[in-house]
């Protein structure tokens, strides 16, 4: 099958890697890809979605998989479908579940899907008034896309007011913060769950846990994610069933009623409070770095799952996972997440250890290739993934692989999966 993958991160690298490992012989293309995706397929550079759709048609692309949120919110799926192409991802209308936090919260309220008490407003007075009714900490969210960084957990009422003021004035997140959500802080533990959907049916993947903060012990600023592990032992069959019945099923039914059937990945950020799942947020694509640990756990055909979901035929397949655990550790550049760093040459040791060779791999993200030399030139540079029969074994292997990667200023956490261990 000829497959086009949109995106340039470790998430897209992982999807391509999983497809390349299948028995079938697939031909992969990336738009735009990164400095390492040429190991898996061909990088192309066509930024206009209409032109890209025409290119896909001319080149007999049988399936397009969209990785990041921005093209989805911009309507790339609608454009490809208008050309009669098969593409995995939600329509522009359905992508509002991530594109607008206000749309998402109002949708949850309308269809009685459990979520935190909130107000959505562009009035600083109303926001301050609602803030006064809450106990600290208080959650303040920008409405639009902020690359996973538009959420502030204010530790005091004063801090919440500063966050609200800076968002509504456009100082923090520009136009993305011109409307805000203020909501109660939920005290529990957080999970990432992913449902692959075809508008009617869905397949729920094993739950993962992500590490958002930059430093060990969950200290430092929020990031796009510094590591993750799956499956988490914090979820049992009862909780999976609650998520299916109370969150995913009413979401798919509700989106059909909104004339925006949801196809693609529904990424549910969940807070578990006293055993009950509460929806923190929806995203409309795989999480990064969660995708990097879920893909290698899949033992059934990954490309078939994407294709069947994109053609409303999920009920025809069974998605299967290994009994192993996966841990992914993100390596970031020197100044991440504060500012960009100057490119640094990446040196990868030759792997002589059979355990590392067999049970670990690297998914590349912020890298470029110059004269056959790989450089770290993005915020999150790569993810070292380890597999094992226990979480500890998977984690130890992931860190063994980290020890084989060298570049100036490399930054990583040393405690990924600590919640489970």
Image: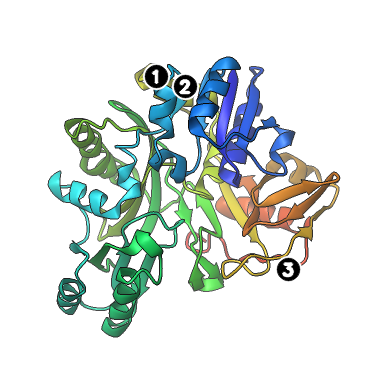
Kindly report the distance in space between the C-alpha atoms of the residues bearing marks 3 and 2: 40 Å
**Which residue is more in the foreground, 100 or 225?**
100
Q: Is 396 in front, or is 252?
A: 252
Residue 276: x %, y % from top left: 24, 54
Q: Which SS class for mark 2? A: helix
Q: Which residue is mark 2?
A: 307
Check whether the beta carbons of the residues at disc 1 and disc 2 lie within 8 A of each other: yes
Disc 3 target residue = 409
Image x and y of residue 246, in percent: 21, 43
Structural crowding at the residue carrying mark 1, measured as other residues with C-alpha within 10 Å and reported as few (<14), some (14–19) or many (≥20):
some
Tell me which residue sits at (45%, 45%) in the image. Answer: 70
Q: On screen, 254 above or below 269?
A: above
Report whether residue 103 is seen.
yes
| Residue named by callout 1 | 311
Neighbour class for label 3 at 10 Å: few (<14), some, many (≥20)? Answer: some
Quadrant hosting residue 241: top left
Rendered image: mark on residue 201: none
The residue depicted at 43 percent of the width and 51 percent of the height is 233
Residue at disc 1, secondary structure: loop
């Amino acid at each position: 099958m000829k497959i086009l993958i949109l995106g340039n991160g470790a998430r897209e690298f992982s999807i391509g890697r999983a497809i390349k490992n299948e028995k079938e012989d697939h031909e992969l293309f990336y738009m735009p890809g990164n400095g390492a995706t040429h190991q898996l397929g061909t990088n192309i550079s066509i930024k206009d979605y209409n032109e890209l759709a025409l290119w896909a048609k001319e080149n007999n692309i049988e399936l397009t998989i969209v990785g990041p949120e921005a093209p989805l919110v911009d309507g790339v799926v609608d454009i490809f479908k208008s050309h009669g192409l098969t593409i995995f991802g939600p329509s522009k209308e359905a992508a509002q579940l991530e594109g607008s936090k206000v749309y998402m919260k109002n949708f949850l309220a309308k269809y009685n899907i459990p979520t935190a008490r909130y107000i959505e407003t562009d009035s600083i007075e109303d926001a301050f008034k609602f803030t006064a009714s809450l106990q600290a900490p208080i959650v303040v969210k920008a409405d639009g896309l902020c690359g996973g960084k538009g959420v502030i957990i204010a530790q005091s009422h004063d801090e919440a007011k500063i966050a609200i003021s800076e968002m509504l004035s456009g100082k923090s997140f520009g136009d993305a913060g011109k409307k805000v959500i203020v909501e109660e802080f939920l005290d529990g533990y957080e999970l990432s769950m992913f449902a692959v959907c075809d508008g009617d049916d869905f397949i729920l993947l094993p739950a993962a846990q992500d590490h958002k903060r930059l430093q060990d012990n969950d200290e430092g600023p929020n990031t796009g994610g510094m590591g993750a592990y799956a499956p988490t032992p914090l979820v049992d069959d009862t909780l999976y069933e609650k998520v299916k019945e109370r969150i995913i099923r009413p979401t798919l039914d509700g989106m059909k009623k909104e004339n925006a059937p949801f196809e693609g990945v529904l990424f549910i950020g969940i807070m578990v409070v006293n055993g009950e799942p509460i929806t923190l947020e929806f995203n409309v694509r795989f999480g990064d770095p969660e995708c990097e640990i879920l893909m290698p756990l899949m033992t059934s055909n990954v490309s078939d799952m994407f294709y069947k979901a994109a053609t409303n035929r999920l009920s025809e397949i069974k998605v299967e996972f290994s009994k192993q655990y996966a841990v992914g550790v993100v390596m970031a550049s020197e100044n991440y997440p504060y500012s960009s760093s100057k490119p640094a040459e990446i040196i990868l040791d030759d792997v002589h250890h059979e355990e590392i060779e067999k049970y670990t791999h690297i998914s590349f993200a912020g890298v470029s290739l110059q004269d056959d030399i790989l450089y770290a030139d993005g915020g999150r540079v790569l993810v070292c993934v380890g597999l094992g029969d226990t979480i500890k074994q998977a984690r130890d292997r992931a860190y063994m692989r980290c020890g084989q990667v060298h570049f100036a200023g490399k930054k990583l956490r040393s405690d990924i999966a600590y919640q489970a261990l």
